[in-house]
Amino acid sequence: MYAIVNIAGKQYKVAEGDKLKVARLTSEVGDKVNFDNVLLTDDGKDIKIGKPAVKGALVSAEILEHGRLKKILVYKKKRRKGYQRKNGHRQDFSSIKVNSIKISTPTKKEPAKQATTTTKTTKKESK
């Protein structure tokens, strides 16, 4: 079973037990977080695609750690102008472990049978 989840504006394909790094979350280490913006679910038998999200689907995860990724250098230069700029950036991340993917199937209620009358009355209008 897997799901595609929108976490902090990015889409991730997750399954139970997966560990992944996402953009930094505001919760503390060890906290449980739930993601209800599930775009697609697949349980091996049935694939459900949301419009935009699958109703009743929930991905629960646990925050393992917070950290910063490797530094990325951003270098700008314009030739023959003497313009050079070097800048570095380290992105914050949260490492999470997916504990479970829950898909609640909505129960369909059968419509109540309404009493139907089969007699038709028509009136002729007189002018």
Image (tube, grey):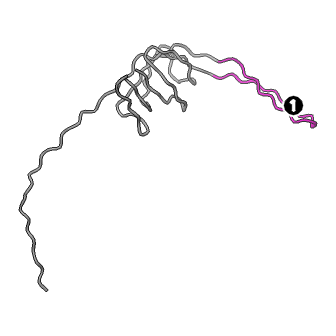
Examine the rendered structure and indicate whether residue 15 appears above or below residue 80: above
Residue 27 or 127: which is nearer the viewer?
127
Bounds of the magenta span?
69-91
Instruction: Estimate the x, y position of residue 101 in percent, counting from the top left.
Output: 39, 21
Instruction: Estimate the x, y position of residue 7 in percent, counting from the top left.
Output: 51, 28
Horizontal side of 8 relative to 34 (left or right) equals right
User: Tag 1: residue type?
Assistant: Gln
Instruction: Estimate the x, y position of residue 54 in percent, counting from the top left.
Output: 39, 33
Examine the rendered structure and indicate whether residue 48 appears above or below residue 120: above
Horizontal side of 118 relative to 72 (left or right) equals left
| Circle 1 residues within 10 Å: few <14, some 14–19, many ≥20 | few
Quadrant for the C terminus, please: bottom left
Look at 90% across and 35% down and name the residue there: 79
Magenta residue check for 70: yes
Look at 12% across and 80% down and name the residue there: 125
Quadrant for the N terminus, please: top left
Per the image, the residue denoted by label 1 is: 84
Look at 8% across and 65% down and name the residue there: 120
Residue 60 or 46: which is nearer the viewer?
46
The single residue placed furthest to the bottom in the displayed view is: 127
Instruction: Estimate the x, y position of residue 124 in percent, counting from the top left.
Output: 10, 78
